[in-house]
């Protein structure tokens, strides 16, 4: 793919943004909700801040990065006046300190050691960090996320850390182009979300169910997602430099 000029990219992003907002609204209705019940977070890896800021000017108000170094490189240039920045990638324990004061939520927590470090750094900054527990819903080997069978126990421990608030769940289901199978994963996630919510555990509020990406965000919403993370449908195919 050749690189596009900014004006060209901007109008493409504008068009895509409208389409996605529209699809989100329709899927929300299908699930008995409205667009205001769904958070549209743009996954901004590899995207220039000029383009990200253009999307923000259109009304986008949540972005997520998934590499610490990239987030730090771009941090001063994001226009975050009306936009919230989250971390959505794999987070090594030794890098928590670099982002603790820069993001509102860390979406991919799946290890107690990682939560211990987030807790330590959050306390240092006198802040409560929202975290989502990532669930390995497809029970895939060599994939991040807590095993579904260990989820309750994990959350019961996660919620005890000072400086941490368990705000929900996130998942990246196995790559698959069968909608029925995908719906099974998304529905399973929704069931965990509902079940955990019903337990009314202290320091756990199931407010955010983050699932669904460019190819399947509408389906995810129909199955209960409260947040979708969309990258390439908004910004075009990624160009890795
Ligand atoms: C890149 C990324 C997305 C978005 O992927 P697209 O398929 O481009 O929409 C969502 N979630 C995470 C964690 C990502 O890293």
Image (cartoon, rainbow, N blue to C red):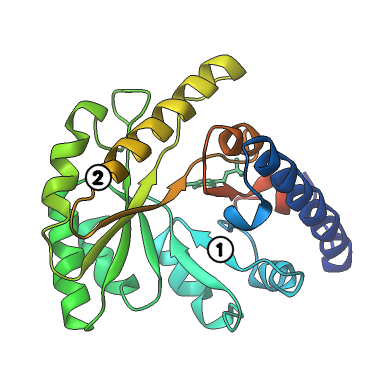
Give the class, few, some or many, for how many residues have Cα within 10 Å of label 1's Cα (few <14, many ≥20): many
Quadrant of ligand 1 in image? top right
Q: Nearer the viewer, residue 232 or 190?
A: 190
202 and 88: which one is in front? 202
Residue pictured at 61% horizontal, 68% vertical: 61
Identify the secondary structure beneath mark 2. Answer: loop
Q: Position of residue 238 (x, y in %)?
A: 65, 48
Q: Could you tell me residue 45's position as x and y percent?
A: 55, 56
Would you say the beta carbon of the disc 2 residue lies within 8 angstroms of ligand 1?
A: no
The residue under the point 58% across, 80% down is 77
Helix, strand or loop at label 1? It is strand
Is residue 205 shown above or below 86? above
Q: Which mark is residue 63?
A: 1
| 11 left or right, relative to 86 | right
Mark 1 or mark 2: whose residue is earlier in sequence: 1
The percent position of residue 204, horizontal first and vertical second, equals 25, 55
Q: Is residue 96 left or right of residue 26?
A: left
Where is residue 227? Give x, y as percent: 53, 50
Which quarter of the figure is the N terminus placed in?
Answer: top right
For disc 2, the neighbor class at 10 Å (few under 14, some 14 to 19, many from 20) is many
Q: Quadrant of residue 180?
A: top right
Given residues 94 and 239, the one toward you in this image is 94
Drawn side of residue 59 relative to residue 15, left or right? left
Quarter-of-image position of residue 217: top right
Q: Compute the Cα span from label 1 to label 2.
A: 21 Å
Q: Is residue 73 visible?
A: yes
Viewer-side residue, 4 vs 202: 202
Q: Are marks 1 and 2 in contact (CB under 8 Å)?
A: no
Residue under label 2: 110
Q: Quadrant of residue 213?
A: top right
Answer above or below: position of 147 versus 51. above
């Amino acid at each position: 793919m050749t690189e596009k000029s900014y004006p060209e990219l901007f109008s493409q992003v504008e068009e895509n943004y409208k389409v996605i907002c529209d699809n989100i609204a329709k899927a929300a209705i299908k699930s008995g909700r409205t667009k205001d019940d769904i958070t549209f977070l743009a996954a901004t890896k590899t995207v220039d801040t000029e383009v990200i800021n253009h999307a923000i000017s259109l009304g986008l108000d949540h972005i997520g990065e998934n590499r610490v170094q990239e987030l730090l490189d771009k941090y001063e240039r994001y226009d975050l006046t009306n936009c919230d920045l989250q971390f959505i990638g794999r987070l090594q324990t030794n890098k928590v300190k670099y982002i603790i004061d820069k993001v509102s939520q860390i979406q991919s927590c799946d290890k107690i050691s990682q939560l211990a470090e987030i807790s330590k750094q959050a306390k240092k900054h006198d802040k409560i960090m929202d975290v989502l527990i990532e669930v390995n819903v497809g029970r895939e080997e060599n994939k991040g996320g807590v095993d579904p069978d260990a989820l309750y126990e994990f959350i019961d421990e996660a919620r005890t850390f000072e400086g941490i608030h368990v705000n929900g769940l996130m998942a990246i289901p196995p790559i698959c182009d069968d909608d029925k199978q995908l719906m099974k994963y998304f529905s399973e996630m929704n069931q965990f979300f509902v079940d955990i919510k019903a337990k009314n555990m202290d320091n756990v509020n199931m407010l955010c169910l983050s699932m669904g990406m460019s190819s399947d965000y509408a389906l995810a919403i129909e199955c209960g997602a409260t947040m979708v993370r969309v990258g390439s449908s908004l910004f075009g195919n990624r160009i890795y430099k």
